């Protein structure tokens, strides 16, 4: 049957142009269904909790492995949150709740001023104005803006209320003449939850760069307090941390340093502190790297001396083993005082032991003869000792004082026929020696174990690169004060996002090799392509370190 035409349909409404105002059961149903849907929705929302609704309905995704034990306890993190909409009524109550900004942190800040400095204990003797530091710390903490969720984070992670520069303030490690205190931002800005059951991922560099690329934001977020710590000095220095065995290189003292804008490790990152003009190695040892690269020095174990003969990574791959005289120097630089007696050498390092050795030379010669010459009777032994004494002590006029002068300060010239061409180099050839009684004093060399003050470094992960690739100035260095470490720019050649336009087609070469021997092909590949980790958190820590956590807590109680 053919459909009606438009003209035929229009005839139905002739002289009835208000037809649309007339009631129709379908339109009435639509109206009442809409009203019922709105009312039903309000009833459901207001009565959800009281009608047995589960909190699981509001879960936006799985909890990370870090917080998996709280899966059924939403209130642990969502402090104050509720599915009971009635609790937010009436409006006056809601308004009062929103305006109430008190948190446990602000409560603690009320008493932190006096208690903080007391809790710092014996380290506060480095401060010129302890109260000023306390005020600065509390000012920084008070500026932290925390949501309910972020405040809940600090209930478990209560040492995290300060950015890493706060760690420096607490331990006074740096030589800066001021303490830089930067409050943490909101926890949830960097740490994202409900995005998977795996371990929560660390923030990427873009999160750090959001602040560190903004000069204004950097300047406004920093709180400063003056101090004059024991480590502060006008020049760089090498110190034993806390009087212990570890030697740390410390940069020169600074003040009012303007925060530098950083967009990435390869873009705008400041030079390493040891690259500053005037920075130097203050190790009290006299060493000439260039001389050890020379062609005329003796062979060692049948081959030319190489960097790795003395510089080897620690067993953990982090640092480099310390240079030890007996292991690295003695083979070429003997402390023998008698060229005719192999192995007849002075003890190393201890001035007291050296003087005792010199006072008992006759006994030492006698002991050497008994251990190395067979069949020597008492008369022959006495003659041997007298002969050695006449020959050696004859070169050292002035008795014991003359011997001390020769051994500690002057040494003796090369002697033809000696295995290394020199009898005694004298302590002062390598060390700083101060005259004194009963024995001179040898200054602690303090050769640094650590150079980077704000980031880690693993030598073991760089064994595929030749030493001179990073320490290019070593072969020409004649002065101990020269710092021969790689520049920030040279590190950024490898440690940057991968340049896929330059990727080599040879996929058999790994971009990030495991620990191993030198492989210049891989080293070159890394320099050309980049791609070695370069996230901010690969080198830097954001929060106060775990070792300083307890000290940090004392500032917020």
Image: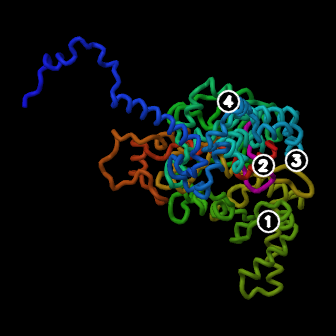
Determine the CA span between mark 3 and mark 1. 57 Å
Give the crowd class for mark 3: few <14, some 14-19, many >=20 residues within 10 Å: few
Q: Reply yes or no: does residue 239 show up in magenta.
A: yes
Cα separation, mark 3 vs mark 4, equals 49 Å
Looking at the image, do the residues carrying marks 1 and 2 touch, with CB atoms under 8 Å apart? no
Q: In the rendered view, would you say 89 is above or below 447?
A: above
Local secondary structure at mark 1? helix
- Residue for badge 4: 91
Magenta residues?
Answer: 235-248
Pointer 2 local density, CA inside 10 Å: few below 14, some 14–19, many at least 20: some
Q: Nearer the viewer, mark 3 or mark 4?
A: 4
Q: In front of the other: label 3 or label 2? A: 3
- Mark 2 = which residue? 432
Left or right side of 212 for 126: right
The quadrant holding residue 136 is top right
Q: Residue 121: which disc?
A: 3
Q: For residue 392, which numbered disc appears in the image?
A: 1
| For the residues bearing labels 3 and 2, Cβ distance under 8 angstroms | no
Residue 290 appears at what percent x and percent y? 58, 46
- Residue drawn at x 63%, y 59% is 321
Indicate whether 352 appears above or below 267.
below
């Amino acid at each position: 049957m053919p459909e009606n035409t438009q003209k035929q349909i229009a005839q139905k409404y002739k002289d009835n142009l208000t037809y649309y105002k007339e009631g129709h059961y379908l339109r009435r149903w639509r109206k009442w269904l809409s009203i019922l849907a709105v009312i039903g929705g309000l009833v459901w929302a207001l009565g959800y909790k009281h009608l047995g609704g589960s909190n699981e309905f509001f879960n936006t995704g799985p909890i990370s492995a870090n917080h998996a034990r709280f899966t059924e306890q939403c209130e642990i993190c969502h402090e104050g949150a509720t599915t009971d909409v009635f609790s937010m009524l009436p409006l006056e109550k809601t308004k009062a709740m929103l305006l109430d900004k008190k948190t446990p942190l602000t409560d603690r800040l009320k008493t932190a001023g006096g208690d903080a400095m007391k809790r710092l204990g014996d380290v506060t003797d480095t401060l010129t104005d302890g109260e000023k530091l306390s005020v600065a710390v509390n000012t920084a903490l008070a500026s932290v803006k925390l949501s309910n969720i972020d405040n809940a984070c600090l209930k478990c992670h209560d040492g995290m209320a300060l950015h890493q520069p706060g760690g420096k303030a607490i331990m006074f490690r740096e030589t800066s003449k001021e303490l830089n205190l930067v409050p943490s931002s909101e926890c949830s800005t960097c740490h994202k939850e409900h995005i998977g059951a795996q371990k929560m991922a660390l923030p990427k560099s873009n999160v750090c760069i959001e602040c560190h690329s903004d000069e204004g934001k950097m300047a406004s977020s920093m709180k400063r307090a003056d101090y004059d710590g024991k480590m502060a000095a006008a020049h760089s220095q090498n110190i034993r941390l806390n009087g212990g065995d570890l030697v740390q290189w410390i940069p020169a003292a600074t003040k009012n340093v303007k925060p530098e804008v950083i967009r990435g490790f390869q873009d705008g990152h400041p030079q390493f502190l040891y690259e500053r003009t005037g920075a130097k190695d203050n190790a009290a040892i006299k060493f000439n790297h260039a001389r050890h690269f020379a062609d005329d020095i003796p062979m060692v174990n049948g081959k030319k001396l190489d960097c790795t003969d003395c510089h080897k990574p620690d067993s953990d791959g982090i640092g480099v083993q310390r240079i030890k005289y007996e292991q690295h120097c003695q083979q070429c630089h003997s402390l023998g005082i008698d060229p005719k007696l192999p192995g007849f050498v002075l003890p190393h390092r201890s001035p007291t032991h050296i003087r005792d050795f010199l006072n008992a030379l006759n006994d030492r010669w006698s002991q050497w003869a008994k251990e190395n010459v067979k069949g020597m009777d008492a008369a022959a032994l006495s003659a041997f000792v007298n002969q050695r004494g006449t020959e050696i002590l004859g070169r050292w006029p002035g008795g014991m004082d003359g011997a001390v002068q020769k051994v500690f300060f002057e040494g003796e010239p090369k002697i033809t026929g000696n295995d290394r061409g020199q009898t005694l180099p004298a302590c002062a050839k390598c060390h700083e020696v101060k005259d004194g009684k009963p024995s001179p004093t040898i200054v602690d060399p303090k050769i640094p174990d650590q150079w980077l003050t704000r980031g880690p470094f693993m030598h073991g992960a760089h064994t595929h690169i030749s030493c001179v690739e990073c320490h290019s100035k070593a072969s020409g260095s004649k002065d101990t004060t020269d710092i021969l470490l790689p520049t920030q720019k040279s590190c950024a050649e490898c440690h940057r996002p991968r340049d896929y336009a330059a990727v080599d087609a040879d996929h058999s070469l790994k971009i990030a090799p495991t620990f191993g021997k030198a492989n210049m092909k891989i080293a070159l590949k890394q320099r050309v392509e980049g791609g070695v980790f370069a996230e901010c958190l690969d080198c830097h820590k954001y929060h106060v370190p775990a070792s300083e956590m307890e000290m940090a807590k004392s500032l917020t109680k």
